[in-house]
Image (cartoon, rainbow, N blue to C red):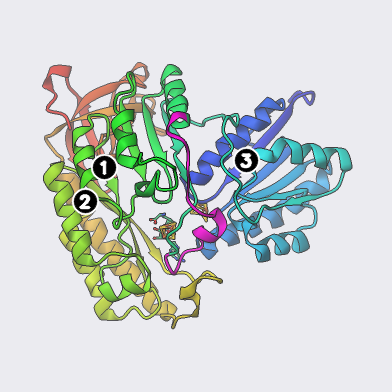
């Protein structure tokens, strides 16, 4: 490798918000003349963009930092940075400083756009920089971006969260809700379409409250209606939705917008009203079930997925059975399932905890039930012709293509690489647990959804 060139490696943990932030970090580093590398050995700068939503996410970062110590000894010119949600917590930032003194740069979620200045400071002064803003200061627009994908793009429409679910650390590390101006979102998406992007996913911790902090009455539903008019854009997705704020108007709008895909990720977390109340979620199981019924009435064939948690403090066997019952009633297409994990500083940390053995037993039962339903739902797709946005070839077979339906299901089928980036009708032959197998059919066969 030519050492006149400089290389960067960003390792990202956590959710899509972090993935998107890492694309900005990449953009800024490339503007500074760095090129991407996958290899730690070749990198001149390594940045860990961290998550702290559960302990496992934090342990991974500490483990990785431990291993990077050797690399720094071997190459003292290597710059190591840590940013993201974890460093936004004072304790974690202190621990990194103390246990991993070789880290050159520590910054948080609110000053990602300041990377070039902080990096220059590290290089010029040859000393570590720790800069964490305790609160947000507006939104930085026009930050360079280097996206991972050429077809599908993440577009953050709002930052932060005001909900303070009693188990969750996110509002403490991501700050209050701030919506981007509609015109900035438009500008970004129109440029994406010009570059050939077909799909955007609008990101926010609770996209349904988009606009509430803006001065006008422009809300999430208005944004979708307007984005639906952008010529050349094929698919619009969004995440995450909060069941409390997913209102009737939004249901009408998603049903009327052609480009808005029929997949809604609606984290339910728990099926027991008592637990939902303790979680500070702001809705009941009845509200949630009615919401799903209304969505399915307005958008037949809609795919619903969720985040579900077991072992929240005080969760009894009856509470948990209410979760299983809700899962059975809704029949989610898939679900991210989590074992509750104590996050210090959150109200739930002080509540009476459920023993680990019970939590493990419950998650097993939940996963088993959800897998059964996911598989059955996928079998129900057999025989249908679905529109697939082809993303490329599968890792194991160069003649096999992979893509997603509008309902966000993964489909694999035989076909040439040239189909990448196009919308192809595929007849589903076999539904499996996590994907659908199909065959390409002529365009006029489409009864696609
Ligand atoms: N804003 C989104 C998701 C935020 S974090 C929402 O409200 O749905 C993603 C998921 O992590 C959450 O939906 C929740 O299921 C899970 N999660 C958050 N805090 C957790 C904790 N302390 N323990 C276990 N899972 C947690
Ligand atoms: Fe966390 Fe709740 Fe906000 Fe989601 S809505 S980020 S779970 S506080
Ligand atoms: Fe993790 Fe931060 Fe996302 S805590 S889940 S990376 S908002």
Q: How far apart are marks 1 and 3 (CA)?
A: 30 Å
Q: Would residue 40 be visible to someone looking at this image?
A: no
Lower position in the chain sequence, tag 2 or tag 3: 3
* Residue 270 position (above or below residue 313): above
Q: Which of 341 and 162 is in front in this view?
A: 162
Q: Give the SS element for disc 1.
A: strand
* Residue 404 position (above or below residue 315): above
- Spot occupied by residue 319 in the image (x, y as percentages of width and height): 27, 76
Q: Which residue is drawn at 47% across and 64% down?
A: 168
Image check: 166 left or right of 225? right
Image check: 20 left or right of 243? right
- Mark 2 neighbour density, 10 Å: few (under 14) some (14–19) many (20 or more): some
Dot label at residue 263: 1
Front: mark 2 or 3: 3
Residue wearing tag 3: 10
Does 181 appear in magenta?
yes
The boundaries of the magenta stretch are 165-183
Q: How far apart are marks 2 and 3 (CA)?
A: 35 Å
Q: Give the SS element for disc 2.
A: helix
């Amino acid at each position: 490798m030519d050492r006149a060139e400089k290389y960067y490696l960003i390792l990202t943990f956590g959710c899509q918000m972090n993935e998107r932030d890492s694309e900005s970090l990449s953009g800024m580093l490339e503007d500074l003349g760095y090129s991407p590398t996958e290899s730690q050995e070749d990198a001149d700068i390594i940045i860990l963009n961290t998550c702290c939503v559960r302990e496992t996410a934090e342990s991974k970062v500490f483990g990785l930092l431990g291993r990077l110590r050797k690399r720094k000894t071997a190459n003292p010119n290597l710059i190591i940075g840590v940013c993201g949600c974890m460093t936004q917590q004072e304790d974690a930032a202190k621990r990194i400083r103390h246990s991993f003194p070789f880290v050159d740069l520590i910054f948080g979620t609110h000053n990602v756009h300041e990377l070039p200045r902080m990096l220059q400071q590290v290089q010029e002064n040859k000393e570590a920089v720790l800069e964490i803003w305790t609160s947000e200061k507006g939104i930085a627009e026009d930050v360079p971006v280097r996206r991972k994908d050429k077809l599908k793009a993440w577009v953050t429409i709002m930052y932060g969260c005001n909900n303070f679910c009693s188990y969750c650390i996110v509002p403490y590390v991501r700050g209050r809700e701030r919506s981007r101006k509609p015109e900035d979102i438009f500008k970004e998406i129109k440029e994406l379409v010009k570059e050939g992007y077909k799909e955007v996913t609008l990101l926010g911790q609770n996209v349904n409250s988009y606009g509430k902090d803006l001065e006008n009455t422009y809300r999430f539903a208005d944004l979708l209606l307007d984005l639906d008019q952008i010529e050349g854009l094929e698919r619009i997705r969004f995440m995450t939705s909060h069941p409390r704020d997913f209102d009737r108007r939004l249901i009408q709008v998603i049903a009327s917008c052609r480009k808005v895909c029929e997949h809604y990720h609606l984290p339910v977390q728990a099926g027991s009203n008592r637990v939902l109340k303790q979680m500070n979620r702001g809705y009941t199981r009845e509200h949630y079930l009615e919401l799903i019924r209304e969505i399915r009435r307005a958008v037949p064939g809609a795919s619903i997925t969720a985040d579900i948690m077991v072992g929240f403090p005080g969760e009894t066997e009856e509470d948990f059975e209410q979760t299983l019952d809700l899962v059975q009633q809704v029949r989610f297409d898939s679900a991210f399932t989590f074992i509750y994990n104590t996050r210090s500083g959150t109200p739930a940390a002080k509540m009476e905890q459920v023993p680990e053995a019970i939590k493990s037993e419950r998650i097993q039962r939940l996963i088993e039930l959800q897998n059964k339903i996911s598989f059955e739902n996928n079998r129900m797709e057999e025989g249908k012709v679905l529109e697939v946005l082809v993303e490329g070839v599968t890792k194991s077979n160069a003649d096999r293509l992979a893509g997603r339906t509008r309902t966000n299901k993964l489909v694999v089928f035989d076909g040439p690489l040239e189909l990448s980036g196009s919308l192809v009708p595929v007849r589903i032959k076999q539904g499996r647990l996590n994907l659908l197998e199909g065959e390409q059919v002529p365009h006029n066969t489409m009864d696609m959804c």
